[in-house]
Image: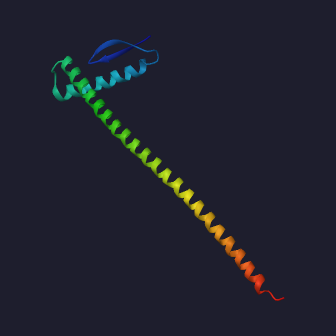
Amino acid sequence: MGVAVVTVAGRSYRVGCEDGEEARLEELGAALDRKVAAMRKNFGEIGDQRLIVMAALETADEADESKGRVEALEGEIKALRERIATLESRQAALTTRLARDFEAAARRLERLAEDLAKDDDALAPL
């Protein structure tokens, strides 16, 4: 098991994690620390705990909004996939119909050619 050291508002915290996740946790901690610093700049000294909680809530809000956008996009993707499947089905049906119609037209042309050949034979001089 790995351990990451995360520093927020000047305090370091040891956080247990899966091996290989240390760098990611440290990046997340640095992002939280930047939020706390920005809030301190905007709100002044209102206490580290309060700043950390506010930054964590803002981060949670952003994550929740992102989750909503992801769910909306997944819904759009699902609808597009269904539309593609419908269009592919229609295309297959049209292709089948066209092939059938071309075959019927070819048979008619062959019959016409045979009929013309018979007429030519009937009109040929003896």
Q: Quadrant of residue 35?
A: top left
Q: Residue at x 32, y 26 (%)?
A: 31
Rendered location of residue 33, percent (x, y) = 29, 22
Rendered location of residue 14, percent (x, y) = 35, 11
Residue 120 visible, this angle: yes
Rendered location of residue 51, percent (x, y) = 20, 22
In this rendering, the answer to whether 76 lies above or below 21 is below
Q: Residue at x 67, y 75 (%)?
A: 112
Q: Residue at x 47, y 47 (%)?
A: 85
Q: Name, please, the residue furthest toward the bottom.
A: 125
Of residues 101 and 121, the one nearer the viewer is: 121
Side of 22 where 94 appears, left or right? right
Q: Which corner quadrant holds the N terminus?
A: top left
In this rendering, the answer to whether 91 lies above or below 12 is below
Q: Residue at x 50, y 50 (%)?
A: 89
Of residues 64 and 96, the one nearer the viewer is: 96
Q: Quadrant of residue 30?
A: top left
Q: Quadrant of residue 126?
A: bottom right
